[in-house]
Image (cartoon, rainbow, N blue to C red):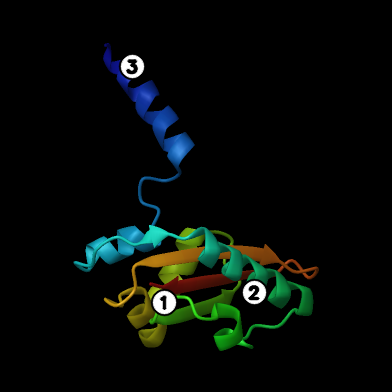
Amino acid sequence: MSLSHAIFAMIIIIMETGSALALDLNAFRMQHGRPALSSSVMLVGIASAHANDMAARNHLDHNNFRQRIGSIGTAHAENVLWGCEDEDCAIRMWARSGGHRANMLRGDVSSYGIASATGDNGRHYWVLELGN
């Protein structure tokens, strides 16, 4: 393979997978010596429902967290925020906050769900649900 073909292939891979420097939850955990978490369809659903609810109300909160998470496992945590355009930004913002950072690095969780929704005002709401 020629050098130009190799460079072209690398560009295609980066375009398809996003920035090589983009940060997701598991990349963040790996940087801090924590094992990767499994994505949970159930936690994605809970995160999506709460993100959509906050977007519809244009309000950031943890309302009814215990009811929303129900009896799934024994350990739970939730991070919420608004304003980020993408997951990379959300993870980086949470990483700058002591409590949110601690949630992302918890050792007693094994799965996660992350989702976002956009309000009528254009504001992006993000929710990260963690559990086991």
Percent of width and height locating residue 122: 74, 66
Residue carrying label 2: 50
Percent of width and height locating residue 127: 55, 72
Q: Which of these two is toward me, 74 or 85?
A: 74
Point out which mark residue 73 bears: 1
Please tell me whether mark 1 or mark 3 is closer to you in this view. 1
| Residue 15, above or below 21 | above
Query: Dot 1, how many residues are within 10 Å of its Cα: few (below 14), some (14-19), or many (20+)?
Result: few
| Residue 48, above or below 76 | above
Q: Earlier in the sequence, mark 2 or mark 3?
A: 3
Distance between the Cα atoms at labels 1 and 3?
51 Å
**Mark 3 residue element:** helix
Point out which mark residue 18 bears: none
Q: Quadrant of residue 118?
A: bottom right
Q: Which of these two is toward me, 65 or 21?
A: 65
The disc labelled 3 sits on which kind of residue? Ser
Distance between the Cα atoms at labels 1 and 2?
19 Å
Quarter of the image where the C terminus is located: bottom left
- CB within 8 Å, label 1 to label 2: no
Residue carrying label 3: 4
Q: Earlier in the sequence, mark 1 or mark 3?
A: 3
Going 45% across and 44% down the picture, which residue do you hit? 18
| Residue 6, above or below 112 | above
The disc labelled 1 sits on which kind of residue? Gly
Can you name the residue that lies furthest to the right here?
120
